Image: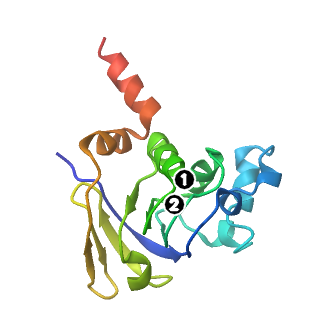
Amino acid sequence: MLQLVITGRVWKFGDDMDTDVIAPGKYLALPLDQLKNHAMEPLDPEFHKRVKPGDIMVAGRNFGCGSSREQAPVVLKTLGVSAILAESFARIFFRNAVSIGLPLLPCKGISEAVNQGDLLEVNFETGQAKNLATGCVFVTKPLSSQMVEILKAGGAISLLKKRLEKY
């Protein structure tokens, strides 16, 4: 079985990253190709220009708090963010991200041990994250086999379509 392993450059953020910071509410009526230009705008107006496909976000506690808007994980995935690691996640954000196929992993201590621009390798099946810049390894509870299956399929709808094709 192939492992879900992602390597990417770190974008580091703090605690309580609200969905209104990730996808500001005043832009929600815009089409996704325009909304993505406002991702993280309150903290970094140039984020959408500087983030590259494959990059990884690392944050403190309570990432994705605030509203249940699905646009928050969608806009990050659209920009090419390959994964998010945080001390903890808001429950609804976590579920929305897995549902659209955006890998994320709660990982205690990660926000203190990585810096902006570090290279991080994450294995979602084993729950290991390694800072390739420092060699520091973090071990956390791996995602469930069901979550890994959803992520490998590209999201819950993609998995459902694959399962329905069998019938």
In the figure, residue 111 lies in which quadrant? Answer: bottom left
Q: Is residue 71 left or right of residue 31?
A: left
Q: How is the image coloured?
A: rainbow
* Figure disc tally: 2
* The disc label shown at residue 77, or none: 1
Q: Residue, x 83% and y 53% (percent of image)?
A: 26
> Is 130 situated above or below 76?
below
Amino acid beneath label 1: Lys
Q: Are marks 1 and 2 in contact (CB under 8 Å)?
A: yes
Residue under label 2: 81
Q: Quadrant of the N terminus?
A: top left
Judging from the image, what secondary structure is the residue with disc 2 in?
loop
**Vertical placement of residue 87 versus 157, above or below:** below
User: Is residue 10 toward the left or the right of residue 109 in the image?
Assistant: right
Quarter residue 43 falls in = bottom right
Q: How far from the left and from the top, in percent, is residue 35?
A: 74, 52
Seen as rendered, the residue at the extreme left is 1
Q: Secondary structure at mark 1?
A: helix
Q: Residue furthest top?
A: 167
In the rendered image, the vertical position of residue 156 relative to residue 142, given as above or below: above
Disc 2 marks which amino acid? Val
Q: Position of residue 9 (x, y in %)?
A: 45, 74
Q: Residue at x 27, y 46 (%)?
A: 144
Viewer-proximal residue among 88 and 102:
88
Q: Residues within 10 Å of mark 1 (few under 14, many from 20)?
A: many
